[in-house]
Amino acid sequence: MGVSNTGDMSRFNSSKLQQSSPIGASFVLFQTLWDSLQSLVFPDICAGCQRVGHLICSNCLQQLITPFTPFDADGFDGFTCIGTHSGPLRKIIHALKYEATPRLAQPLGALLTQQLHQQKWSFDTIIPVPLHQHREEERGYNQAKIIAHALVVENTIVMDALARTRETPTQVGKTAAERKTNVNDAFALKPAFLPQQLEGKRVLLIDDVCTSGATLVACAAPLRAAGVVTLYAATLSRAHFTPLI
Ligand SMILES: [Zn+2]
């Protein structure tokens, strides 16, 4: 059993609607046929191995949770992720970010939720690492934001409170020191948010990948300055980072 598209959910809803009215039943029958036709013409392809049938096939799904290198930077009370940034997890995150497949946030968010439940952390606010406005407009979504919304943690709210104050070149290929300089002072609270809204909060910061951790550390600065008392971080994956200097 792999992770399928929304067609499955439509079929689930259909049985409920069919009991309500003949009009509802006709609509649902049409939608079910339409979903089936769509999946015949455009079948889901696994983002991890390109096998036809599911968005993430059962074989890849079983390989996603793996041991990872801890991230224990100053300013953080804990870190977790799904696994090491390699194999199918790396390919699936790549598809989420660069191949216009935001639907992948749902199954990845479910896996990250599993990891979070094992941590026994206590937090009330989930904040995604922001993209610069231009980058988000170009991509059409911020992957960290849709992951944050895909998490299922009781008594929490997602607060899109941070903004990138300047465009930063990609961190890829940079040394640890360059990465730090690249994102230093690049994040601030959005003008719509007052520091008082975060004062005393226990926050979970969300991003897609943690490599050197420079981005997470740069995001921590304005959050701590606003009075956040506890700060955890969770990402989809943890990449190996070998400092060049
Ligand atoms: Zn697969």
Image (tube, rainbow, N blue to C red):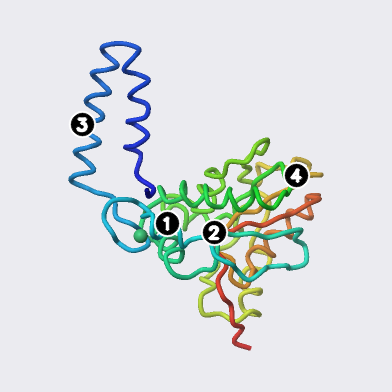
Of callouts 4 and 3, the N-terminal one: 3
Give yes or no for contact between labels 1 and 2 (Cβ–Cβ under 8 Å): yes
- Residue flagged by tag 4: what amino acid is it? Leu
Q: SS for tag 2?
A: strand
The residue identified by callout 1 is 96
Residue under the point 42% across and 63% down: 94
User: Which residue appears at 65% of the width and 41% of the height?
Assistant: 192
In front: label 4 or label 1: 1
Mark 1 and mark 3 lie on one chain; the one further toward the N terminus is 3
Closer to viewer: mark 1 or mark 2: 2
Q: CA distance from mark 2 to mark 3?
A: 35 Å
Q: Is mark 3 within 8 Å of ligand 1?
A: no
Q: Earlier in the sequence, mark 1 or mark 2?
A: 1
Amino acid type, mark 3: Leu
Q: CA distance from mark 4 to mark 1?
A: 29 Å
Residue tagged 2: 236
Q: Secondary structure under badge 4?
A: loop
Other-residue count near label 1 (Cα within 10 Å), few / some / many at <14 / 14–19 / ≥20: some
Callout 1 secondary element: helix
Residue 155 vs residue 176, the one in the foreground: 155
Dot 3, how many residues are within 10 Å of its Cα: few (below 14), some (14-19), or many (20+)?
A: few
Q: Amino acid at mark 2?
A: Leu
Q: Quadrant of residue 24?
A: top left
Label 4 sits on residue: 198
Q: Position of residue 168 (x, y in %)?
A: 55, 67
Q: What residue would you read off at disc 3?
A: 33
Give the quarter of the image for residue 197: top right
